Image (tube, rainbow, N blue to C red):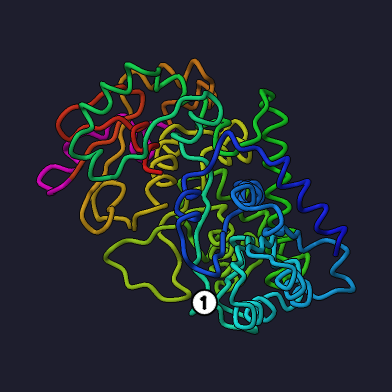
């Protein structure tokens, strides 16, 4: 255990402390004795744990990576009990799903060692409230999503700006956007963000960054999903094909029968695979407000989970309408409930109707950036959701409705620039 404590002190000491995620202060203020930080690979869970360790007396905090060989012959519970006897106060557990019987031993630590606060991380695929021991009455679960546009500006550009609530954006977007455009060039940073800004490890090489994302996707499917769901190789291979089909057709309106036939998957298996991909934070799915939802209901529409995955997986198939919708959904979904209305693109908190729209300059920018082959532009624009023909007529006579436009620095009335929603967290 002395060796493990030594590793803990070194890792905590070397943890970067310049940039902290938006949930950091809330965790510090929490009085909960058991906190679970859930998130996909690459979202920064390990760094967050180590930063939290820096806030405490080094002798009172213990960071443990649960894939350490130490635990091939030692139990987590016994290690925690000894640490408590030595005066320990904060136990930081990384990737708990890699430790057998993790939920039962964490429950025993919580029940038997009341002087210890435990903060643990795990894959977003894992349901911490299912398993051998129910933690639902004990653990406070906190989700760590990808970097927001606001966090990207701080992490990569050193521009520190406040979080904005949705109500603030809707009521005061004109004044806010005019103020912010005096401090930064939002569209320049926005176009960098949608391609390479969702994760904190872009180093200037776009090709290598996308390869890292592909590797991360493979690890999520091959390791996280496989280890938590006990799926065989063939099932994982079919899920990879499913993800590529979705990425090549985003926003994707699934025909479950045809898709299942193409992938060789029964209907129920296909719906369950979609649910796992969403749980793993690789896709977003939405259902129309008019439909009743059951466990095996198919979604009405599917997007990738963030815009960077879009560029990494689909290669040269990017369509700006899908990128635009993905950005908006990615940021709204962190704190708000989203569904599909009968008209327009999104219904937020059962109150606000959002229609996304491409400005007149966007088509020129798409040609310049070559997101799709030039000879396919007419076909794409005629078919894409939220394309150039979308106007106020889509939401006319709908109360609390807004038109969200890309490549727009400032808006007016119910027309809001898309990039501003990147400040929601």
Q: Is residue 246 left or right of residue 264?
A: left
In this view, the residue farthest toward the left is 397
**Number of numbered discs:** 1
Residue that badge 1 annotates: 138
Q: Is residue 125 left or right of residue 179?
A: right
Q: Nearer the viewer, residue 151 or 81?
A: 81
Compared to residue 277, the image places residue 146 above or below, namely above
Residue found at x 57% / y 71%: 127
Compared to residue 319, the image places residue 373 above or below, namely above
Q: Is residue 7 left or right of residue 243?
A: right
Residue found at x 32% / y 73%: 292
Quadrant in which the N terminus appears: bottom right
Quadrant in which the C terminus appears: top left
Residue 356's x, y, as percent?
A: 31, 38
Residue 269's x, y, as percent?
A: 60, 72
Q: Nearer the viewer, residue 342 or 30?
A: 30
Q: Nearer the viewer, residue 37 or 90?
A: 90
Residue 261's x, y, as percent?
A: 61, 64
Q: Say whether residue 153 is magenta.
A: no
Q: Secondary structure at mark 1?
A: loop
Compared to residue 28, the image places residue 175 above or below, namely above
Residue 135's x, y, as percent?
A: 55, 78
Q: Quadrant of residue 314?
A: top right
How packed mark 1 is, by other alpha carbons closer than 10 Å (few <14, some 14-19, many 20 or more), is some
Q: Say whether residue 387 is magenta.
A: yes
Residue found at x 52% / y 49%: 145
Residue found at x 40% / y 46%: 329
Magenta stretch, main secondary structure, is loop
What's the magenta region? 380-400
Q: Is residue 162 left or right of residue 36?
A: left
């Amino acid at each position: 255990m002395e060796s493990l404590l030594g590793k803990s002190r070194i890792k905590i000491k070397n943890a970067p402390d310049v940039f902290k995620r938006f949930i950091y202060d809330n965790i510090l203020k929490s009085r909960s004795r058991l906190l679970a930080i859930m998130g996909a690979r690459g979202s920064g869970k390990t760094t967050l744990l180590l930063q939290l360790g820096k806030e405490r007396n080094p002798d009172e905090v213990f960071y443990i990576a649960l894939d350490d060989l130490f635990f091939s012959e030692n139990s987590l519970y016994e290690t925690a009990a000894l640490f408590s006897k030595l005066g320990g106060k904060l136990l930081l557990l990384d990737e708990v799903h890699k430790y057998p019987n993790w939920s039962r031993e964490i429950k025993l630590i919580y029940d038997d060692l009341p002087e210890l606060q435990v903060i643990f991380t795990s894959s977003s695929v894992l349901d911490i409230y299912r398993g051998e021991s129910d933690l639902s009455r004990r653990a406070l679960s906190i989700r760590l999503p990808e970097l927001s546009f606001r966090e990207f500006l701080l992490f990569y550009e050193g521009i520190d700006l406040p979080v904005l609530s949705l109500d603030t954006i809707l009521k005061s977007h004109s004044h806010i956007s005019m103020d912010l455009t005096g401090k930064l060039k939002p569209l320049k940073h926005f176009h960098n963000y949608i391609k390479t800004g969702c994760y904190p490890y872009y180093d200037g090489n776009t090709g290598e960054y996308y390869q890292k994302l592909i590797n991360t996707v493979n690890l999520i499917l091959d390791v996280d999903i496989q280890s938590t769901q006990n799926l065989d190789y063939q099932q994982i291979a079919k899920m990879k094909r499913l993800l590529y089909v979705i990425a090549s057709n985003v926003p994707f309106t699934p025909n479950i029968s045809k898709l299942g036939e193409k992938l060789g998957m029964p209907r129920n298996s296909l719906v369950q695979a979609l649910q796992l991909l969403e749980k793993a934070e690789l896709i977003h799915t939405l259902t129309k407000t008019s439909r009743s939802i059951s466990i095996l209901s198919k979604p009405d529409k599917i997007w990738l989970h963030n815009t960077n995955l879009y560029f990494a997986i689909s290669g040269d198939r990017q369509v700006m309408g899908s990128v635009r919708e993905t950005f908006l959904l990615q940021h709204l979904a962190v704190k708000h409930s989203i569904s599909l209305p009968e008209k327009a693109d999104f219904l937020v908190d059962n109150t606000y109707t959002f229609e996304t729209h491409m400005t007149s300059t966007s088509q020129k920018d798409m040609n310049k950036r070559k997101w799709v082959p030039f000879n396919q532009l007419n076909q794409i624009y005629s078919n894409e959701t939220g394309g150039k023909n979308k106007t106020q007529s889509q939401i006319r006579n709908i109360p609390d409705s807004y038109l969200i436009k890309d490549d727009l620095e400032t808006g007016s009335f119910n027309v809001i620039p898309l990039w501003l929603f990147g400040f929601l967290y």
